[in-house]
Image (cartoon, rainbow, N blue to C red):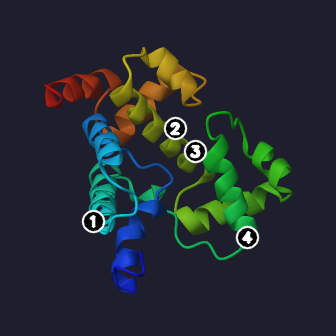
Amino acid sequence: MDRYFQPNIVSTYLTCFKTPIIFIPADYRKKLLTWNKAMSHTSESSYLLLAQILIDLSKFQKKYCADSSLFVSDVKTSSAQRIINYIDANYTTLQNVSQIAECCGVSESYIHRIIKKNTSVTVKEYINKLRLRHAIHEMDCSNNSFAIISKACGFQNISYFYYLFKKNYGLTPTEYREQLKKTHK
């Protein structure tokens, strides 16, 4: 990309990757697949298309990621990055902080400090926000029941899933899904 764009523009395009989960609407995913089939990957215009896609991803990030706590600040140490990467990869199965500490070879208190420092939320809040973003993605992409979605996202209790969803988004999962249906018509 540096060949076609100035470095400050490239860094602006890549800001969308500071969020662990980027939500992409289903209709846009279809558009991406169409573009992928139509474009020659070596043509000059494919770089312009890439720039447009990155701009769109940044817009989706701002639109669908209202909770800025999912933005991870620049992590300086490799152990901190390893911890965040581990949580991002395993949030659906994590039950407690001791699991993270054991797998990453650090203390639980260190995990709490690192997550708070780099995400401005607690470990539990960070994991729950990842799970909720996953749930929103599942609701957009499937007609699965909320019980299946909540379990797939790592929630052990559907009532807790409903509680957190309402607390974070101001709507119940049912109300959210109804809004999705209205916007996709």
SS for dot 4: helix
| CA neighbours of label 1 inside 10 A, class few (<14), some (14 to 19), many (20+) | few
Q: Quadrant of residue 15?
A: bottom left
Amino acid bearing label 4: Ser
- Residue assigned mark 4: 78
Amino acid bearing label 2: Arg
- Residue assigned mark 1: 45
Compute the Cα span from label 3 to label 2: 6 Å
Compute the Cα span from label 1 to label 3: 39 Å
| Labelled disc at residue 65 | none
Of circles 3 and 4, the one toward us is 4
Q: Nearer the viewer, residue 4 or 70?
A: 4
SS for dot 2: helix
Q: Earlier in the sequence, mark 1 or mark 2?
A: 1
Asked whether, in this view, residue 129 is left or right of residue 53, the answer is: right
Compute the Cα span from label 1 to label 4: 37 Å
Could you say where residue 92 lies in the image, as x and y percent from the top left? 62, 34
Q: Is residue 129 above or below residue 8?
A: above
Could you say where residue 43 lies in the image, as x and y percent from the top left? 33, 64
Of circles 1 and 4, the one toward us is 1
Residues at badges 3 and 2 in contact (C-beta under 8 Å)?
yes
Q: Is residue 88 above or below residue 4?
A: above
- Residue assigned mark 3: 127
Q: Nearer the viewer, residue 168 or 70?
A: 70
Q: Earlier in the sequence, mark 1 or mark 3?
A: 1
Q: Earlier in the sequence, mark 3 or mark 4?
A: 4
In the rendered view of the protein, which quadrant contains the N terminus? bottom left
Q: Nearer the viewer, residue 150 or 14?
A: 14
Amino acid bearing label 3: Ile
- Residue assigned mark 2: 131
Q: How many marks?
A: 4
SS for dot 1: helix
